[in-house]
């Protein structure tokens, strides 16, 4: 199974998306190595090796989701709600 965000194409080229959610938990400056094992063949012989990609975390800006609080009426009981921020 290929690592998250990695696609190996039939012609040997690849793409890697470090924005994949699997890497969002990295703290700023923290690194994670993504290792891909592969084998090539010429029809007679094969050779195996690895590709190592180092992903470095960044300090992403947090996001705030819009929240609709409960309805309040003048003179009525107090209402409470929770707002949530996400640092993804």
Image: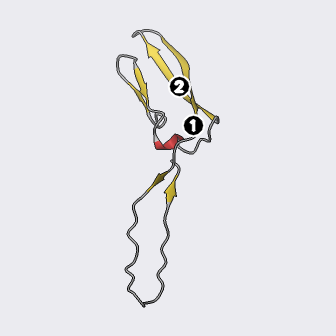
Identify which residue is drawn at 42% across, 90% down. 76
Q: Which mark is residue 37?
A: 2
Mark toward the viewer: 1 or 2? 1
Question: Can you say whether 57 is above or below 13 in the image?
Answer: below
Residue at the front extreme of this rendering: 74
In the rendered image, residue 6, in percent from the top left (x then y), is placed at 44, 31
Which element carries disc 1, helix, strand or loop? loop
Mark 2 or mark 1, which is nearer the start of the sequence? 2
Q: Which residue is mark 1?
A: 58
In the rendered image, residue 51, in percent from the top left (x then y), is placed at 54, 21
Q: How many marks?
A: 2
Question: Can you say whether 86 is above or below 82 in the image?
Answer: above
In the rendered image, residue 35, in percent from the top left (x then y), is placed at 56, 28
Figure quadrant of residue 28? top right
Identify which residue is drawn at 58% across, 36% down. 57
Q: Which mark is residue 82?
A: none
Question: Can you say whether 74 is above or below 7 in the image?
Answer: below
Which element carries disc 2, helix, strand or loop? strand
Question: Can you say whether 24 is above or below 15 in the image?
Answer: below
Foreground residue, 49 or 26? 26
Badge 2: how crowded within 10 Å, few (<14), some, or many (20+)?
few
Foreground residue, 73 or 41? 73
Q: How is the image coloured?
A: secondary structure
Residue at the right extreme of this rendering: 30
Foreground residue, 34 or 41? 34
Badge 1: how crowded within 10 Å, few (<14), some, or many (20+)?
some
Identify which residue is drawn at 55% across, 18% down. 49
Foreground residue, 1 or 79? 79
In the rendered image, residue 22, in percent from the top left (x then y), is placed at 51, 42
Distance, label 1 to label 2, CA atoms, is: 26 Å
């Amino acid at each position: 199974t290929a690592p998250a965000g990695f696609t190996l194409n039939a012609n040997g080229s690849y793409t890697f998306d470090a924005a994949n959610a699997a890497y969002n938990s990295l703290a700023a400056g923290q690194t994670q190595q993504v290792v891909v094992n592969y084998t090539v063949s010429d029809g007679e012989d094969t050779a195996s090796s690895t590709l190592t990609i180092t992903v470095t975390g960044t300090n992403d800006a947090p996001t705030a989701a819009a929240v609709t609080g409960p309805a309040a009426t003048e003179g009525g009981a107090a209402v409470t709600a929770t707002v949530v921020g996400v640092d993804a």
